[in-house]
Amino acid sequence: QTKSGSNRTPLLIAASAAVLTGAAAGGYLYLRGKQPHDPSLSGPVDTYIDPVFASAPPADVDVQALASLDTEAGIPGMEGLPAEEDELFDSAAGAIEEDIFGLPDAAPAEIAPAPEPVAAPAAEVPTIASLSPQPAATYPAIPAVVTIESEANAGNAIAQYQLAQSYLAENDLDAAVPLLRRAALKGAAPAQYDLGKLYEQGLGVDQDMIEARSLISKAAEAGHVGAMYDLALFLAEGEGGEMDERGAAVWFRKAADHGFLDAQYNLGVMYAEGIGAEQDLSEALYWFELATRQGDSAAALEVRNLTGRLPAEAVREVMDAADDWTALPSIALANGRFGAQRWNTGNPLQVQAVQTALSRLGYLSSQPDGVLGPQTANAIRAYQRSEGLAETGTVTPELIDRLNTGASRGRG
């Protein structure tokens, strides 16, 4: 689902009187233009899809250029850390060496005869030994909190892309562009798209329509729906390369099949005008109708025009087809829906280690399972309260530092 193209810059295409379907006074129909640069179009950073990325850059990636970027362009705030070997979309999980459970198995319950009542023993006077401090609870050390900056510096392309998004939101292009470039070289379609939009508009880089078209084309081929739409316009306008109206119609169709509203509208225009495809008013009506059902008022005007010109039976067939239409699902990864990552959800092994520590300290009674549910959150809050920490109910660096300090005391 995309915003209506009412605020887009239109591409003017002349219409003959015979196929004029709208804007009768001017005699023209308009193709809606490219999208403005908007990082949110690539998807929020906290949506949950469970992706599995490939383990190597795409075949056409310049590996030497990639290595150069990763050694020369450090992440802001991470200059003191050595860059690790670059990976495509994930870095090592860092398994915990010690047994993070370590709790004795409960003995099986047995039914035994009730014992004979006995007199209570006389109260004993406490001895010096019994009053001495008891050993502190012991538990394995907890791994440090993973940050998006450390993961980006280690070469995780998802982290690089998402960190770039935060810099773009702050209008810090100097920090965002190198991160987008590194992620784009690894084949991250959302990074390719966003970097292409920056080249298109000359934001943070010198304007270069050839480079913009190349990057957006790669993102479109990978399945980025917004890039499909913009590539169609590059082809229709001949920007950054040759004009290809038939190619434009193909890419508008791909985006329209995913429910991209402006692509549906533009496809209606192309069929109405016979540009990039054979003129087909029924097909034009179909795509205008789909756009109308997404709330597009300009498409609704074209629907009224065309329904008055086509035979009633043809109109019924189009409406029946529109009733049956459903949008194709988009590829999650190509559209920036990366799933829960360690830096925004916590490492399950880390959560298990925290649960084990809280269990040993008496704050948590349930078995450690690596899931930060309500019981674990309440246990964390209780521990944070007792230690004078901010009560977040989440795994924080301060929580881990305090628990690890306690573990060190226990082992010492």
Image: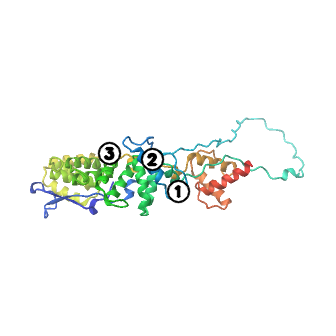
Q: On the image, numbered disc 2 is attached to which residue? A: 67
Q: CA–CA distance between discs 3 and 2? A: 24 Å
In this picture, residue 127 sits left or right of residue 316: right
Q: For marks 2 and 1, give the CA distance.
A: 17 Å
Tag 2–tag 1 contact (CB < 8 Å): no
Q: Which type of secondary structure does the marked residue at label 1 adopt?
A: loop
The number of numbered discs placed on residues in the rendered structure image is 3
Residue occupying the point 66% across, 53% down: 403
Residue 342, image x, y percentages:
52, 49
Horizontal relation, residue 174 to residue 365: left or right: left
Q: Quadrant of residue 207?
A: bottom left
Q: Which mark is residue 220?
A: none
Q: For the residue marked with disc 3, what is the amino acid?
A: Glu
x then y, percent, for residue 332? 40, 47
Nearest the viewer among 44 and 36 is 36
Amino acid under disc 2:
Ala
Which of 389 and 182 lies nearest the eye of the viewer?
A: 182
Residue pictured at 69% horizontal, 48% vertical:
360
Question: Mark 3 falls on what kind of element?
Answer: helix
Q: Is residue 304 above or below residue 139?
A: below
- In this view, the residue farthest toward the left is 18
User: What is the image's colouring?
Assistant: rainbow
Q: Is residue 290 visible?
A: no
The residue tagged 3 is 221
At horizontal 16% and vertical 62% (from top left) the residue drawn is: 23
Whether pointer 1 and pointer 3 mark residues with C-beta atoms closer than 8 Å, the reply is no
Relative horizontal placement of residue 184, taking residue 357 as reference (left or right): left
Label 3 or label 2, whichever comes before in sequence order: 2
Question: According to the image, label 1 marks what residue?
Answer: 79
Say whether disc 2 or disc 1 marks the residue closer to the N-terminus.
2
